[in-house]
Amino acid sequence: MKQIKILPFCREVWMDDGDEFKAEVQRIMEAKPVNNLTEDEVVTTLRFLELKASLSEGRYIQVVVHRNDPRLELCDDNDRFLALLADCDSREVLLGTKRCRSIFGGTVYHWRKIGHKCPITDVASALSECSSGYYGRGWVIAPHIEMLISYILETSTYARIQKLK
């Protein structure tokens, strides 16, 4: 029988990490790798990278989130959204409300509200290569956050992010 590793954190536990995490956020804010960064964007980006590192076995292995994924049972819906964003980002597709609902349940309104409040996303549209044309709308990682992610991966000494290097 295969054992599944449940992620040992929820937002309340993770945010209370203390000095190492606060020092990492402060270092990034002082370095200003991207203009007009907010602290909320930096904190959410670090959370996104930690979830990505926890859900994948290494840098080149795809993040996969399944329906009712037991690894995310202690996480709130904001973290589940970030986990699905990492999943869709590794496959280079849009994250839409339909996917959120099929994986975790809930309503379209609930997931749209979470998606629009997330500080590291942009809304994007996609066109299919088939004759049908329009594929749909969804969320992707914002371009300035992608620059922030590459900066963090290059310069971070934060232990949880080292797994992605």
Image: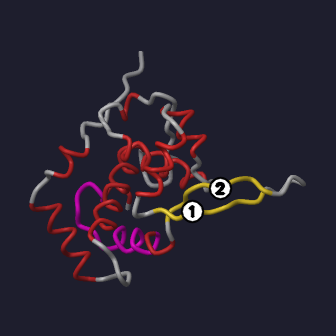
Q: Which residue is mark 1?
A: 123
Q: Quadrant of residue 5?
A: top left
Inspect the image, locate mark 1, and give the three-letter code of the amino acid beneath it. Answer: Val
Q: Residue at x 42, y 64 (%)?
A: 120
Helix, strand or loop: magenta stretch:
helix
| Left or right of 86 in this view: 72 | left
- Identify the element where label 2 is drawn: strand
| Left or right of 22 in this view: 128 | right
Mark 1 or mark 2: whose residue is earlier in sequence: 1
- Confirm whether the magenta stretch covers residue 26: no
Q: Which mark is residue 137?
A: 2
- Confirm whether the magenta stretch covers residue 158: yes
Q: Residue 122, image x and y in percent?
A: 52, 65
Q: Residue at x 48, y 33 (%)?
A: 106
**Would you say the residues marked 1 and 2 are in contact, meaning their CB atoms lie under 8 Å apart?**
yes
Q: How is the image coloured?
A: secondary structure
Q: Which mark is residue 18?
A: none
Q: Quadrant of residue 125?
A: bottom right
Q: Single out the residue that lies furthest toward the left.
A: 19
| Left or right of 99 in this view: 38 | left
Q: How many residues crowd mark 1 within 10 Å: few (<14), some (14–19), many (20+)?
A: some
Q: Residue 102, image x and y in percent?
A: 57, 33
Inspect the image, locate mark 2, and give the three-letter code of the amino acid beneath it. Answer: Arg
Q: Residue at x 45, y 55 (%)?
A: 59
Above/below status of 129 relative to 74? below
Q: Residue 53, image x and y in percent?
A: 37, 50
Q: Single out the residue that lies furthest toward the top.
A: 1
Q: Residue at x 17, y 61 (%)?
A: 21
Q: Which span is picked out in magenta?
A: 146-161
The front one of 65 and 112 is 112
Task: Report the quarter where the C terminus lies.
Answer: bottom left
